Image (tube, helix red, strand yellow):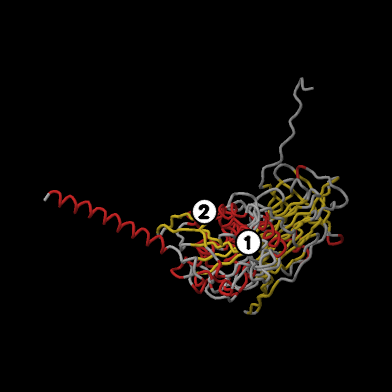
Amino acid sequence: MRKFLKRWIVFGSIAVVLAMCAVVYVRAQDRFGDCDTIEYLRRFDARLAEGLGALGRDDFQCVVALETSVDTPAGERHLRVIRHVVSDWAEGEGVSAAVAAGVHGSAAALPRLGDFRIGNATVLLLDDFGPGGQHENFGDIAAWTNIGPNDECLITLWLLGAAASAENAGAVVAHELMHCVQFASLTAGQMGSASPGGASGGGTWWMEGSADWFSTLALPAAPFIAGRVSTFDADSPTVALNLMTYDAFVFFAWLGGSHGPGTVLPFLHGMAETADASAQQASMRDALPAADWRRFAQDYLDQGIRDGQGASIGSAPAGGDDWTFADTRTERIALEPFVLRRGYVNFECGRWAVRASPAEHHAVKPTRGTWGAFPPTVDALDGRARQFRFGAMPSARSRVDLTLQATKEVACEECAGTREIDQCLVGTWRMTNDGMAEFANRMMRGFARVAEVAPNTTMTLSEDRTFANVVEGARNTIVAPDKRADGRMSGNTTGRWSAKNGILNACPDTHRTQGTMTGSAAGISVTGPLPASTARAMRNAYVCDQETLRLKLELGRAGTLYNQFKRVSPPPPTPRAAAPGDG
């Protein structure tokens, strides 16, 4: 009885082992299609069903040159390379090693994509030319990818094509394996949005650009990547990103480098399912905030973008437009959606008030400094022009017309033929007595009088020989027996000043005023705008001390009036007297 039980235990164990082996064997067979059948092979190239190459279909003997596995969030998947048993006649030196490096490098890089999907994948090295047709920069189709039964990803690399070289083959295989990821991870609508043959339009830009980027995540950049960058350099000043093709690699190199490889697939998940350009741009707007699109433009213009290996992509951005301001004027700059507009903004000698509207979509960078908004004031009074690098990548729904207004507040010329100043005058002064009120009362000879005066005027005389005169809500009221007039005014004047021989010279460069005048009589009031005023050069005798400033205005036969100011900024430092023993 014991011998009988032992035999059954042994037979049972053997049966279990054999059953397990059978299961393992079946699962291994189910990973891939049968490469010895024409039905399977024709999915790589339809010409195999008609007898491709010198050997013909009946003589195709499949061998597996390489197989490896890759861990995915959905479980283990397998990658393999197959070929005809005697196809090495068509293979260039180093191609097999390059293909193996592409497969192994991709297997190592794929987990860095994060939550990705991929089916089992087969690469067929086919000993013939590709089917023809202009494609990429190889002159004919380098490789392509299809999806077979059981979601197997089928990649064909033609050994007689220009892409099948030791320098390019590994990167081409990695590029195609990224297409396998796209097919498995994205919707059919998204994958169908690209233009045939990698032509411009639809989703081609993200499909091919991200695949080229992945090739640099798996391996050092192949020689053809430099061509993608140079094409981007040439096209990006005028071509929208969504109308590019393989040259969109530059954007994905930035995205994967600045935000991490794990952000690329989530970006692709957000892309449109139609080829319509407006749908593509809408999905781009939703995928990244406007600040990120500006940052891409800035990093590109700074030549700071790196590929998947961390190496510089070697970009050479074109300079762009040149906008130079020598006098007050307005420049209008058209910004098209997702076009990387760039240029240089130059401010010649002077002090400039700068206003850009709208403020978003663009950034500027001074010669020494960081990217940001235009400063409200640009000071070039030292005679050296100031230059700013301009970059824009608008994500707006339509063209943005940027208005850049530069007002020369202070010119560089001397005031009244001299650059001398009096240090006593340097500072900020507030008017305490408006001589014009006294002058007006004198001129009206009693039939009316100034009842209220609130000059609210501040004058700043700077050591750099510039001045600013600001009037904030000045009020004047003139009354007569049966009528009255009330004036309100605000404004500012800027320019240059000098002082010599007790004369203060003021040379205005800008002048703006606004206000109202209300006349009242017989119970009726009428309000209207104050007439526009102009500023002219002034020469006034003055008396200055540390607390007060008195200006004398000569009005010819009308007499003389005085304006008095009180200092509101600290007085300039008094030179230290020499002490005994000072040498």
> Which amino acid, mark 1?
Leu
x and y, in percent, of residue 543 in the image: 78, 46
Asked whether the viewer can see residue 231, the reply is: yes
Determine which of the numbered discs, if any, sits on residue 47 in the image: none
Seen in the image, is 458 located left or right of residue 582?
left
Quadrant, the C terminus = top right
| Residues packed near mark 2 inside 10 Å, few (<14), some (14 to 19) or many (20 plus) | many
Q: Count the labels in the image.
A: 2
| Residues packed near mark 1 inside 10 Å, few (<14), some (14 to 19) or many (20 plus) | many
Q: Name the residue under label 2.
A: 109
Looking at the image, residue 52 lies above or below residue 408: below
Quarter of the rendering containing residue 546 = top right
Q: Name the residue under label 1.
A: 159
In the picture as drawn, the residue positioned furthest to the left comes out as 1
Viewer-nearest residue: 355 or 424: 355
> Which amino acid, mark 2?
Ala
Query: Of helix, strand and loop, which one carries label 2?
Result: helix
Query: Which residue appears at 76% of the width and 49% of the height?
Result: 550
In the picture as drawn, the residue positioned furthest to the top comes out as 581
Viewer-nearest residue: 168 or 39: 39
x and y, in percent, of residue 176 in the image: 56, 62
